[in-house]
Structure formats: C-alpha cells, structure tokens
Amino acid sequence: MARPREFDTDVALNAAMLAFWERGYEATSTQDLLDAMGLSKGSLYKAFGDKHNLFLIALQNYLDHLYEKMKQSVDAGSDPVQSMTGLMGVVENLCYKQEMANGCFAVNTVVELSQRDEQASQILKRHLVRVEKLLATLIKSGQDRGVYRRDVSAEHLAEALFVYIFGMLAQSRGIASPSRTKRLTSFAMTFLQPGLRS
Amino acid sequence: MARPREFDTDVALNAAMLAFWERGYEATSTQDLLDAMGLSKGSLYKAFGDKHNLFLIALQNYLDHLYEKMKQSVDAGSDPVQSMTGLMGVVENLCYKQEMANGCFAVNTVVELSQRDEQASQILKRHLVRVEKLLATLIKSGQDRGVYRRDVSAEHLAEALFVYIFGMLAQSRGIASPSRTKRLTSFAMTFLQPGLRS
DNA sequence: GAGATTGTTGACCGAACAGTTTCTAATGGG
DNA sequence: CCCATTAGAAACTGTTCGGTCAACAATCTC
C-alpha cells in the first residue's frame, strides 16, 4: 500500500534504549539517538513521535525484557534457593558486565525522572511492584520449606531485598568491582536465612 | 579595597545545591540557578566559575555537611546500637521529609554523573569510602560488645549496610512512604544482629 | 575626593537543542 | 502503468543553552 520501512523497529528501539541507558534522558540529544539508531530525523519522528515518547517506549521495552529474564531465572531453579541464586545472577550481570558498569536502566530512570515525569514514574512504579511481588512469592516458598527466616513476613523481606538490590544497581555506577559484587550477592542470601550464627 | 559582594556566598551556594538536588545536573539550567540564587549572570560566573564548577562546589559542600551530620549522630549515641539508630534516622529524614522525597543529592549524582564526569566521580568516591569506613567502625564496636554478628567481618557488613542505605535513598524518589521507610530501617538493624530467630 | 579595584547588570554571542517541513523515493492497489 | 500513500534525507525553524563582555556602581586606599 505504501513504501515500507527500511529499518527494523525493534533494532532501532533497542539502540535508542542503550543510548538512554548510558547517558540518561536529559543528556541524550536527538542527534545522539539518530547516530545510535542510524536513522534520519524524519524517520525517527514519524516512527516514534518525539524524544519523550521514544524514551517511554524504550523504557517499557526494557522493563518487560528484564522482568521476563527475572521470571525465567526464577522458573529455572528447582528450589527457592537455586531460584534466588539465579535471580541474583541477573542482578550481578547488570552490576558488572565486561569492565563496564551501566547499572540498571530502570534504577537510573527512577533516580533521574520519577520526581518530575508522571508517565515515566507510573511505568516504573508498575514494574517495581511486580518485581517486589516476584521476590515475595519466591521468599514465601522458601519460608514454607524452612530455608528462609519466618520472623519477618515474606512481603517485608521482599521489600528489604528489593531495596538491597536497588542499592547494588544504583551504586554499581560509582563503585563496582566483581569481588565486591560477589560479596554483596552472597550476603543478600544470608540475611534471608533463619538465624543461629555467631 | 574594592566593591564588596552583595550576596552571601554560602546562602547562594546552598540555593544552587537545592536546585541541583531537585532536578539533577543536566536538567538544571543556568537560568534555574540564577532564579534560585537570586543573582544575575555576571555575578554567578565571577563568583563560581561556570555551571560545572558551581556544581562540584555545591556537591562537595553537601557531602561535607552530610558526613558531619552522620558523624555527630554517631557520636551522640551512648552505645553502638543507639548510634546506629541515630544514623539511620538521618537516612530516614532524607528518604521522607515533609511529604516530599528528594532522596540524597550524593546518591542522585552517583547515578547521573559518575560514569561520565571524572571530577564528580572522584569527589563522590572519596565520600562513599569515608561513609563506609564510618559504618565499619561503628559495626566493629558493636561486634566487640557482642550486639552485632561476627560471622562476617565489620568491613563486609559495612559494605552491605552501605548498599542497603544506598538503595533506600535511591528508591525513595520512586516509592516512598513513612511506614515503608520505617520498616526498612528497622530491618536493617536486624540483619546486623547475631542469629537465633525462627 | 581621585583613582584603583572589584561587583553587578543586561545586552549579546555562537552553538546546540527539539521539532517541522519540503521535497524526493519507493511501494502496492487499481 | 499510474497514483495514492508512506518512508527517507536534508534544509530549516524558533528557542534555549552555557558563557562573555562592556558599561556602570560601589567600595577602599591614599
């Protein structure tokens, strides 16, 4: 019916996402996006609206992929502890991947935009809630099997673990090293365990 | 010897800091700063150099004040647990103050700039290290008195607590409530304790 | 009170910003 | 094969960006 696109929307969107991830929303100019995506201005605006809209789409896309990856690594484990290890592996990868620590696009965006971008804020809040629920479910099943502490409810443990993970991802941009990251994940596992230690 | 300043440097600096704190480095324009500080362009540039320099000075100022406040609340406690409670009170205040959650200027800046601003990164790293050391010292004295767990070294416990606090401050911009904040701080106290719980 | 010195003001600068428009190119349906 | 339709490239728009500068004002020293 008309001229077809010369680029793959998903590929372009992913490139935009990486650009935003690296530099944040404000510091990424339209020119940066054009370079990263390999498009000319008209194409970008025709396909994605404007910069803000492109950002929201890229963000949503990232969040969905991340959540999917988390759920998969949870499902892959044959018991709660194994699932938790897998999930923390996902976090570790975000904290320290091939010499470069970009942290988590979601975390970065919470810090940069939540206060003044209502749309981004709502997208993020929805995601954060579902991740915390995923953690709660996993912790609950660990509690039922007696491998996780029961003096705090699964929901509140999930809250704490979530904050801890959030902290790992946030600080990874400032002070990251593989050994530190490893220590931090293994400590996370210990504070979920029931007591009796010196 | 010459015409004196019409404004108080510290007051102006503090106003600039608040502006940067609220909106971040990139999203704060020189005009925003001028409005917040109540200066005209020439005065600002003569007194503080340029936007980036002003930011660094404001950041350093904030960090020094924050560290001082932390140290004071540690010193005010008569035992490690009381000191820790006081310190967590400082964090709580940052997370949720009078309906508005602006988080921590340091945390926000780590996320926004650490990756691409070498000067900001170094200023921040120096601060993060000293805060972590403060935590380690406090925890060590708690371990010596038997109120904190000893199966993990004070340094590594401090590392974990630091990350947890970092997470609280980072996420506070997205999902903050007084009750959640309270729960999070009290949980932090528990994972430092020695074991024996159900 | 004259002159040296520094602060303040507002006009001004080129560059970069996000976004639009115009024109041409490629496609499918009739 | 022509035409409606959409994609792409590039020139263009008005605005805002960070930063400078020249003129004027206020102070101190002598």
Image (cartoon, coloured by chain):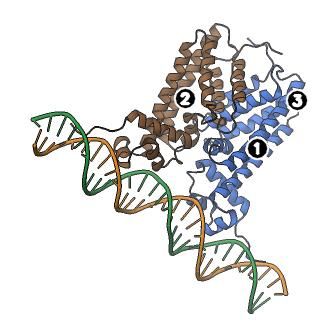
Chain colours: A brown, B blue, C green, D orange
Residue labelled with disc 2: A128
Q: Secondary structure at mark 2?
A: helix
Pick the residue in front: B95 or A192: A192
Looking at the rendered structure, which numbered label has been put on residue B141? Answer: 3
Q: Type of residue at label 3? A: Ser
Pick the residue in front: A79 or B64: A79
Callout 3: residue from which chain?
A: B
Task: Report, in whole angstroms, how far the alpha carbon at label 2 lies from the one at label 3.
Answer: 36 Å
Looking at the rendered structure, which numbered label has been put on residue A136? Answer: none
Which quadrant would the N terminus of chain A be assigned to in this image? Answer: top left
> Residue B29 location, x and y as percent?
56, 56
Q: Is residue C4 left or right of residue A161?
A: right
Q: Is residue A146 visible?
A: yes
Q: Type of residue at label 2? A: Leu
> Residue A183 location, x and y as percent?
72, 25
Q: Is residue C22 left or right of residue B47?
A: left
Look at 82% across and 37% down and name the residue there: B134
Which quadrant would the C terminus of chain A be assigned to in this image? Answer: top right
Marks 1 and 2 close (CB-CB < 8 Å): no
Q: Type of residue at label 1? A: Arg
Q: Is residue D11 left or right of residue B158?
A: left
Q: How many marks?
A: 3
Look at 73% across and 33% down and name the residue there: B162
For marks 3 and 1 on the same chain, the one whose residue lies earlier in the sequence: 1
Task: Report, in whole angstroms, how far the alpha carbon at label 3 lies from the one at label 1.
Answer: 23 Å
Marks 2 and 3 close (CB-CB < 8 Å): no
Residue labelled with disc 1: B126
Q: Secondary structure at mark 1?
A: helix
Look at 57% across and 51% down and name the residue there: B26
Vertical arrangement, residue D16 with respect to residue A16, above or below = below
